[in-house]
Amino acid sequence: MTNPILTLEDLHSPTWRKVKEWAESELAQLRINLEADQEPERTAKLRGQIKSCKHLLNLESPQPLVADDD
């Protein structure tokens, strides 16, 4: 594993806490919306938005090393 993208200082900043709180709230609402009967295009859009929120929240986690298959 490599170092996380955000430092401990970043993770304890008021800005990160606000961003994280917003992303968690947005993720919860997107999941509720995904459960509703939607058009396929809308479902795909919601899944993309969910993935984006998850990527944002994962910034605080250590990033895995990617091995070369060569």
Image: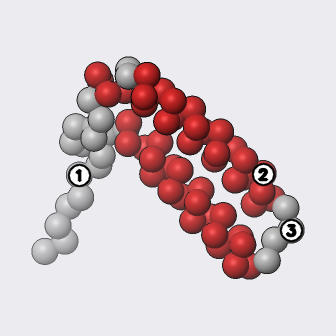
Q: Are marks 2 and 3 in contact (CB under 8 Å)?
A: no
Name which of mark 1 and mark 3 comes first in the sequence.
Answer: 3
Picture disc at residue 65 = 1
Image coordinates for residue 8, horizontal then vertical, percent: 29, 24
Of tags 1 and 3, which is closer to the observer?
Answer: 3
Image coordinates for residue 36, horizontal then vertical, percent: 85, 61
Name which of mark 2 and mark 3 comes first in the sequence.
Answer: 2
Who's the residue at 37% across and 38% down the image?
61
Who's the residue at 53% across and 50% down the image?
53
Q: Are marks 1 and 3 in contact (CB under 8 Å)?
A: no
The amino acid type, in three-letter code, at marker 2 is: Ile
The amino acid type, in three-letter code, at marker 1 is: Leu
SS at circle 2: helix
The amino acid type, in three-letter code, at marker 3 is: Asp
Left or right, 41 with respect to 38, comes to left
Label 1 vs label 2: CA separation?
Answer: 33 Å
Location of the C terminus by quadrant is: bottom left
- Toward the bottom, the furthest residue is 40
Q: Which residue is mark 2?
A: 32
Q: Which residue is mark 3?
A: 37
Who's the residue at 26% across and 29% down the image?
7
